[in-house]
Amino acid sequence: MKFNWGTGLFIFFVFFVLTLGFVLYKSRQLDNSLVVDKYYEEDINYQKHYDKIKNLKDLGRDIQLKSDQNARNLVITFPHGAASVIEGTITMYRASDKSKDVITPFTLRQDSVFVLFTGNMDPGKWKIKIDYQCAGKGYFKEDDIVL
């Protein structure tokens, strides 16, 4: 059998249609929903969020994150003194699966160190979001960590 341009064109179109079908099939399997439920509300309130980030930078000291793999803990040290009351939330955000996100409220009265147990969290890359208040001012820190 001789291979001519008509046969080549037919093979190309068959391959093209099969590839297009495969890409369509794979795209239907992905979850393409918004990761944040209240996306537009968060977008409107971004200036408040930016002010919290600026407040933390203005302190001159940053929040220290230390992962203890053996005890499966994350030690968070705040840059404020022990005399201030610190309260807020720590969000452990998992980009690959929204159902694995962990939100932990906290209040520190005598110490500026908080220990977060990470034993029930999957190992891998997480984004930690620390949103807290101290002495009437709001602060925010966001960082990537690997558990």
Image (spheres, helix red, strand yellow):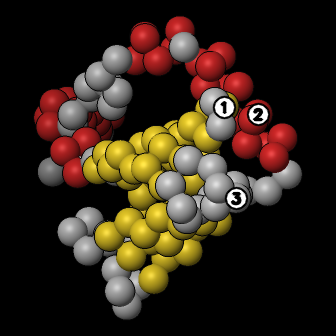
The answer to whether residue 56 is seen in the rendering is: yes
Q: Is tag 3's residue or tag 2's residue first in the polypeptide sequence?
A: 2
| Label 2, residues with CA under 10 Å away: few <14, some 14-19, many ≥20 | some
**Residue under the point 23% across and 51% down:** 100
Q: Secondary structure at mark 3?
A: loop
Above/below status of 106 relative to 118: above
**Residue 74's disc number:** none
Instruction: Tell me the CA gap for discs 3 and 2.
Output: 19 Å
Q: CA distance from mark 2 to mark 1?
A: 11 Å
Measured from the top left, where is residue 140 in percent x and y? Answer: 60, 40
Q: Secondary structure at mark 2?
A: helix
Q: Which residue is mark 2?
A: 54
Residue that carries the numbered disc 3 in the rendered image: 81
Q: Amino acid at mark 2?
A: Lys
Q: Is residue 102 left or right of residue 110?
A: left
Residue at image position (27%, 28%) is 32
For label 1, the residue is 137
Choose mark 1 or mark 3, whichever is in front. Answer: 3
Vertical comparison of 144 with 95: above or below: below
Q: Nearer the viewer, mark 2 or mark 1?
A: 1
Q: Position of residue 5 (x, y in %)?
A: 32, 34
Residues at discs 1 and 3 in contact (Cβ within 8 Å): no
Where does the image place residue 114, in percent across and percent down from the top left? 47, 64
Closer to the camera, 99 or 70?
Answer: 70
Vertical relation: 8 (above or below) 84? above
> What's the residue type where badge 1 is placed?
Lys
